[in-house]
Amino acid sequence: MRPAALLLFAPALLAAQSLDGGLLDRAWFGPAVRFESVPHQGFQWVKPGIQLRGRTLRIQEWQPAAWLGRVRDGNDRAFADHAKAGLRAELERGLRQGLTRVAQVSTSEGDVLVVGRTVDAAGEEPDAAFSGAQSLSFDLKLVDAVSGDLLAAFHQTLTGEGERSVMDQYGRWCVDLGRRLAGGGTASAAASASQPPKPLLDLPATLERLEALRGDGVLTEEGFQALRAKAQEMARVK
């Protein structure tokens, strides 16, 4: 094939390439997400015009590991299981610090759901004489609890000498994430000055989804009623 012809195919080839060695599963986030690589921060997508001021982010329970990498043994799975509680706790702490005076952070209530999962992990051998290299790959997304819209999507792989090093890096990543969200994400998040008008809220579908969240225990009765009232108010806005 001639070089000129290769140039024509280059965009399609790049779009088809797997990200982070295949550990970034775009399907978990949705077809509309177009990730960008951010130095030291992994991959991210932020909805243009995102505004979190005055909102409350609810940190969900960390989802079961997806294991998208190579086959992992018991040590790797043990590392992922041991880190699970810390991942949620550090995320809460980091977002609370980064979003100071902008948004609230909670583990029980909120109109923005924060969902995370581990997609791969490499632990160290239990009989290792010295702490060896360990890695953790994870996904994170922010979802509007009322409309169901995806607000932001993130993927990162961290590698360090031992679990403590990996978790220290993760804690700093969470704080920085909060600061970026407080500022509306990256420049690309506010790239579009004019967006097409948002369609009116599908109230029946939204109420059905909120009912499901209440049934699954994601929303308390108080939280359900608050979001239900907000959805009805949004549906009335012309």
Image (tube, helix red, strand yellow):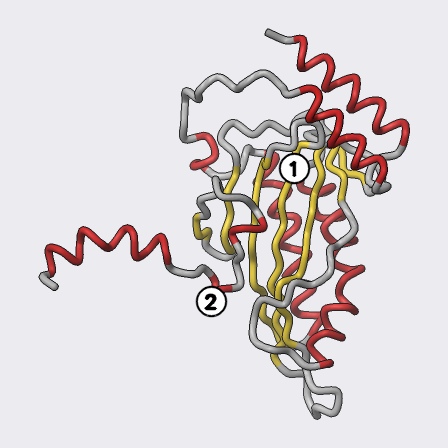
Q: Secondary structure at mark 2?
A: helix
Q: Which residue is mark 2?
A: 21
Q: Residue at x 46, y 55 (%)?
A: 39
Residue placed furthest toward the right: 221
Q: Secondary structure at mark 1?
A: strand
Give, as a three-letter code, the residue at label 1.
Val
The location of residue 226, given as percent across then percent down, is: 82, 22
- The numbered dot on residue 143 is 1
Please state if 7 lies on the left or on the right of 206 as rendered: left
Q: CA distance from mark 1 to mark 2?
A: 26 Å
| Image quarter hosting the C terminus | top right
Name the image quarter holding residue 159: bottom right
Please state if 40 lies on the left or on the right of 121 as rendered: left
| Image quarter hosting the N terminus | bottom left
Q: Residues within 10 Å of mark 2 (few under 14, many from 20)?
A: few
Placement of 125 over or under 22, stated as above or below: below
Placement of 199 over or under 124, stated as above or below: above
Of labels 1 and 2, earlier in sequence is: 2
The location of residue 178, given as percent across then percent down, is: 64, 42
Q: Residue at x 69, y 77 (%)?
A: 76
- Residue placed most toward the observer, 35 or 41: 35
Count the marks: 2
